[in-house]
Amino acid sequence: FAYVDGSSIEAMGDLSITAKNQAIIHSGVDAGAVAIGGGLVGGAASGAGTDSVNRIEVDVIARIADTIGDGIIAQDVLVQADDEAIIRATTLAASLAASFGLFGGSVSISVSLADNTIADSSKALVDNADILAGGDLTNKSRENSDISAESQSVSMSASVSICFSLAGGCAKAEATIE
């Protein structure tokens, strides 16, 4: 927050009321699993999972309100709120299962999830204020949020036997800017 509330100001030059948010999240999550089994009856099972949840929620507010006396007197008056929230997220899950024997099987599963949200608000307000600007009165709000999310899942399974081999993977990345 940047605000002038219940005040009066007489500036010799320009007056700037500026609120700025530059929140940044860099997130990286990796997981891996390996299973090897062997024998007359061989079996192997492996699983790996990642889950990355990132959230930025900030109210960015610049405000002039409820001035008293002569209010605000200045050359140029700027009321500005800037929001520049950034999320960079990567997730990776890798799983490998291998078995060997006369009879056997292997199962490999991997899951990689990424959930990223920016729920910011940006407001520049002039409310119930007397302002005498000799030049410009500028009231601006800017929202410039960005999310880059990558989710990868790798799963491999091998069986050298009379039986089965199963591998499965799931990757999901969500990005929400509200």
Image: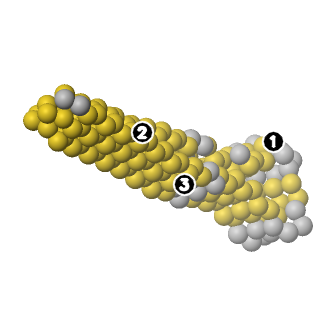
Mark 1 against mark 3, which lies toward the viewer?
A: 3
Secondary structure beneath dot 3 equals strand
Q: Mark 1 vs mark 3: which is more N-terminal? A: 1
Q: Residue 103, can we see it?
A: yes
Foreground of the two, 83 or 61: 83
Q: Quadrant of residue 131?
A: bottom right
Residue 153 at x, y = what percent?
Answer: 33, 47
User: What is the number of the mark on residue 50?
Assistant: 2
Foreground of the two, 144 or 16: 144
Residue 95 at x, y = what percent?
Answer: 33, 42
Residue 56, compared with residue 42, is above or below; it is: below
Q: Mark 3 vs mark 2: which is more N-terminal? A: 2
Residue 130 at x, y = what percent?
Answer: 76, 52
Q: Which residue is disc 1 drawn over?
A: 6
User: What is the number of the mark on residue 86?
Assistant: 3
Contact? badges 1 and 2 (CB < 8 Å): no
Q: How far is mark 1 from mark 3, CA to CA?
A: 34 Å
Residue 64 at x, y = what percent?
Answer: 73, 49
Q: Farthest front residue?
A: 40
Label 1 amino acid? Gly
Q: How far is mark 1 from mark 2, CA to CA?
A: 50 Å
Residue at left offset 56%, top offset 41% = 57
Question: Tag 1: Cα neighbours inside 10 Å, few (<14), some, or many (≥20)?
Answer: some
| Side (left or right) of 24 relative to 71 | left
Residue at left offset 28%, top offset 34% = 37
Residue 61, compared with residue 41, is above or below; it is: below
